[in-house]
Amino acid sequence: MNSCSNSEEYTIEKNFKTVVNNQNCQIEYSYPKFISNDSKDEEAELNAILEKYVDYAYYAHRCDKKIDEKRIIKGDYNITLKTEDKLSIEFITEIIHFGGNRMDTVYHSIVLNPKKIGDKEFSIFQPDPKFVIPNFDKGDLHKYVEEYNSNHFDKVNLIAYESESNYVITWGISENDFILYVGGEGEWFGKDKIRIPINELKKGNNR
C-alpha cells in the first residue's frame, strides 16, 4: 500500500490514528492527508472528510464494556491512481476474528478531481463513472458481476448492475482498470473487488 505519492500539484501524506486500544478493543487506522502546493482553504474540509470517511467510531461502540472476544479493527488505504486531475483512494478495513484465524475486509472508495476542490460545485463523494468513461452505462458491468457470482459462494445483487438501476455502486480506478467494489450495493462500500480493463468499458459494446 502506498503511504505517500509525489506530484507537481499535490502530495498525499500518511497519517495514523488510534480510536481505542484497551482490553476489549483495538481500533486503529491510517488515513490520507491531501497537501496542495497551492494551498486552499477547502483542503481543511477535504482532509476532515478523508480522516473520517470510514466510520471507525461505529466499531468502537461498547468498547468500554467487557465482550466475549477482543474487537480488532485495522484500517489502511491505497492510492490506486494519482494524476493532476484524477485521484482515486481505496480504503481498506480489516476486521479480525478469533485471534487472527478469520478476517473480513470492507472497502470504501473516493474518486475526485483535485483541480476542482476549490469549485463551488465540487463534491467529495464519488462522481458518476462518466467522469472517466464518457459513454459509461451501468449495464456494461453486469456480465463481469455475473461471472463473479458464478465463481463465489456469496452472491452479488445483479439488479444493481442493470442499466436503469438506481443502486449506488462503489468504484475506483487505476491506470488501466475500473475497480468495482461489490457486495454492499446501495450502501457505499464493498466486500470484494473486481478489476475490469477500462478499455473494455470504453468500447461501449458490452450490453
Image: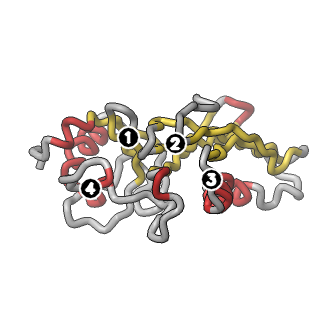
Point out the tag, 1 or 4, that comes first from the N-terminus: 4
Q: Is residue 70 visible?
A: no
- The picture places residue 5, in percent across and down from the top left corner, at 58, 31
Q: Disc 1 marks which amino acid?
A: Ile
- How far apart marks 2 and 4 lie (CA) works out to 21 Å
Few, some or many residues within 10 Å of mark 4 (<14, 14–19, 20+): many
Label of residue 150 in the image: none
| Quadrant for the N terminus in the image | top right
- How far apart marks 1 and 4 lie (CA) works out to 14 Å
- The picture places residue 156, in percent across and down from the top left corner, at 35, 50
Q: Depth check: give the residue in front, 63 or 119.
A: 119
Point out the tag, 4 or 3, that comes first from the N-terminus: 3
Location of residue 44 with respect to 106 vertically, above or below: below
Point out the tag, 2 or 1, that comes first from the N-terminus: 2
Q: Disc 4 marks which amino acid?
A: Tyr
Q: Which residue is mark 3?
A: 50
- The picture places residue 158, in percent across and down from the top left corner, at 27, 54
Q: Which residue is mark 4?
A: 161
Report the mark closest to the observer, 1 or 4.
Answer: 1
> Quick check: 103 left or right of 120?
right
Point out the tag, 1 or 3, that comes first from the N-terminus: 3
Task: Identify the residue at horizontal 20%, vertical 42% (top origin).
Answer: 201
| Element class at badge 4 | helix
Point out the tag, 3 or 2, that comes first from the N-terminus: 3
Task: Identify the residue at horizontal 86%, vertical 44% (top origin).
Answer: 21
